[in-house]
Image (tube, helix red, strand yellow):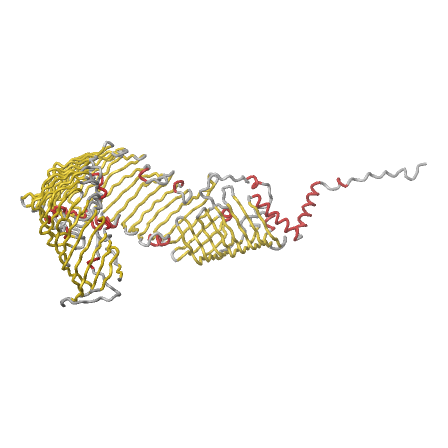
Amino acid sequence: MPTATSNVKPAAAPVPVERRLRPGRWLLLLLVLLIGSLAVPEVFQVVFGWGLKFEGWRRGASVHIERIDGSLWEPVLLTHSYVALESASGAVTRVEIARTELSFSWQSLFQRNGDPWLQRAALRGVVGKVQIPLDRSGVRTASRSWKRWLPLPAPSALGLPAAVEAQEIDFVFQSNGDYVRIEDASFAASTTGAGELSVPRLTIRQPWLRRSFRNVRGKAALQDGRLALADVQLEPGVNLRSLTAAAVQLASGQLDLDAEFAAFDGTLRVESSTKPAGGGAVFEASGTFEQINIAKLASFLALSDAAGGIIKDGKFTFRGPPRDLARAQASLRFDAVNFQWETRQWDSLTLGLVLMERRLQVPQLELRQGKNELRLSGELTLPDTGRQWWQGDFTTTVDAKIANLTELSALLLPEFKYAAGSATIEGSILGRGGEFNGQLLVSGSNLTWRNAPIETLHAAVKLNGKEVQIANVELVNGDDYLRGRGLVQFSNPPVYWGELRVAVEDLATYAAFLQKPVLPEPLAGGAIIDWTGEGSKEGNSGTFSARLRKVRSLGAMAQQRHPINADLKATYQSEAMQFSRFTLSDDDSVFTANIAVGGKALHLRSLRLTYRGATQLEGDALLPLDVWQRWPDVSFAQMLSTEVVSHVRLTVRQLDLAAAAKLTGWNFPLAGIVDGTFAADGPATALKLGGQLALTKGRVPLDWHGEVIEQASAQLAFRDDAMEIEQFSGRHRFGAVQLGGTVRLADVLDPALALTLRSGNAVVPLSGDTKADAKLTLEISGPLSSAIIRGEALLTPWVHDVAPRPFTIAPPPIHVPSIFKLGAPWSAWRYDLGLVIGGEGSRVFGPAGAPLSIAQP
């Protein structure tokens, strides 16, 4: 019989726990646990912090946050946040934020409806700098582009929020030495409406502008991921109508902005950006402008206070580093009317410029002023450091039609206000590697400069490589003319050839042309000059002739000048000149000689001086003067040669010194009649002298201030190296003087003196009306440059128009009579003599040209 359990099925085996839950359910459970844990503020804060650091790492930035407060259900507060970012282009951004409050929309995060996940960001105490290396090259930064494509479900945590509020902003955008800085700024912006912008101080230091602005205010908003500003007034008359910038890119060192200004009575539109290039970043900008008031623009840029006119319209582009034009590409074109810059003015100016690959192209430059027109075009390679523009490659074409030279002063240079007439200039020049090709034609009519007239002007210059040919130069005014032509080859050394002929009735007519560039002072008188010459590495040579009539000065010293005539003809070489005709004359005197210059000597053969037909001086002279090599910057010491042996033979017959001196062109205060002979032989360091000269009716100047000795007579003898003054007497304004002694010429530049001067009845002034009878016995010894005066001087004072009487000047002070104060060339002499004034004895010592010292006995 079956048992009770025989119909009962055995129990099933137990199922393993691993088979009860599927893997997908495990992930769902893990996600639920994770989300649930985020509800715990402490967990949320840790996860949020690591999320920000991960997002920063993905973008190449390092993020550090000292403290995070908040939870999943309330705003997040970040205290003391630090962000450092170096982009692939080398731009470096560093930001420190004292306090940041973030509000999120988790619904937008999961629904992906396009609304910003970050709804609001409030920042306080933002300090930072963005450094953009615009001209940096060769930057090597590790690429992080693969990090940006990590499969993350969340949007970027660095995207713009729906609303931003920021206060206490101090930020710098810098590129090398250029920067823009905002200080203590604040703004509020959102995607739903405009907020306020306030910048107490804005500083711009750029190549084109260095200014600071105060209390800048405007509107701010967020539009399509960009920060937008509007109605921002930098200063009266300069208003930023609108500006939009890609804020996120700006934080990473990339500039992308558009701006429109209402400024300087016109409008200006600008688009600018930075783009990666060659491991760095390149700056790009373009814009248009119209109706710009030039005076206001120049004042704003601090360029000039003397500017004016209106730029009707224009445009520009730029690509490259702003401070390195050689590496930039740029273009500029504008039209301006009533243009003024400093002293220059134009009725209209049209300018076009293109800069590319170190070449500056000027396709158009047109200036108009009245009836004057100037057109210029060409191109130029920017020169390297230390080189001038004309040493590189360039081309230029010029076409100028000047109907009124006086108006040209407003066009180019103010000096043209002294000019009148009309002129044309046409030509083109091509420069390549220091060689030039082209031609330039200049013509003019009825020209005047101040009061100097030229009826016609023609000039033609041709350039061929290193050769400049002056095909023709002609200036004509009535019967006066200047004609010339020539050629210069710029070899090393240069080679030249030329000829010139000038005929002028009166040089005074052209004083305005000649005074500054040619002559130290204006001259009057007629001139006919012919010159032909050439030069090469072998030397220079040529011929010239000149006929001058009544030539005299019209300058400040005209009264001291004397009109003379000259008739000259000579040939010259590098180290010599030979005159076949040399004549100087005036109405009474004629000087002639055969003159040769060279070999460090001046040789005068058959020299003759006649006065009213009578021969007064004749002879020969070989002088050790290196005139040819030293001229025109000469002094006697420079010209004197010690290598040449002198040979002089002169015969003097009743020579009128006053008439002879006038042939120098000066009215020297020199007079007298001289008779005798003079001879000199030997080098300048060992002269042997001979002969005798007698002076009568003489007038001898002592200095350049009018001190002279009248009624002079003298007997001079020349022996060995000395001139012996056997007798000399005359009358100074103080009284009669006598002189005797020797002057030795062993050193021609500084002769040795041994002279005695006596005066027995001189009258000298002391002070006021007080004068004194003087008796002088003075010994003058030593070199001419520093002689010493010794001896005795006895002075008896008396009052003007009162009979002489004893008079004592009690010290102090004792006034030194002015007779003892000497000017140049005697001012370096020294006194050491006894002086008795009214019975009081003392000594006078010290330099003759300075206040003298008086020693009491």
Q: Position of residue 256 (x, y in %)?
A: 46, 46
Q: Position of residue 658 (x, y in %)?
A: 10, 49
Q: Position of residue 558 (x, y in %)?
A: 15, 51
Q: Does 368 sit left or right of 668 as displayed?
A: right
Image quadrant in which the N terminus is located: top right
Quarter of the image holding residue 434?
A: top left
Q: Position of residue 358 (x, y in %)?
A: 37, 39
Image quadrant in which the C terminus is located: bottom left
Q: Nearer the viewer, residue 87 or 229?
A: 87
Q: Does 327 sit left or right of 668 as displayed?
A: right
Can residue 187 be seen here? The reply is yes
- Which residue is pictured at 32% across the width and 38% down the height? 391
Q: Nearer the viewer, residue 633 or 783?
A: 783
Quarter of the image holding residue 830?
A: bottom left
Q: Does 696 sit left or right of 124 as displayed?
A: left
Q: Nearer the viewer, residue 569 or 108?
A: 569
Can residue 508 be seen here? The reply is no
The residue positioned farthest toward the top in the image shown: 538
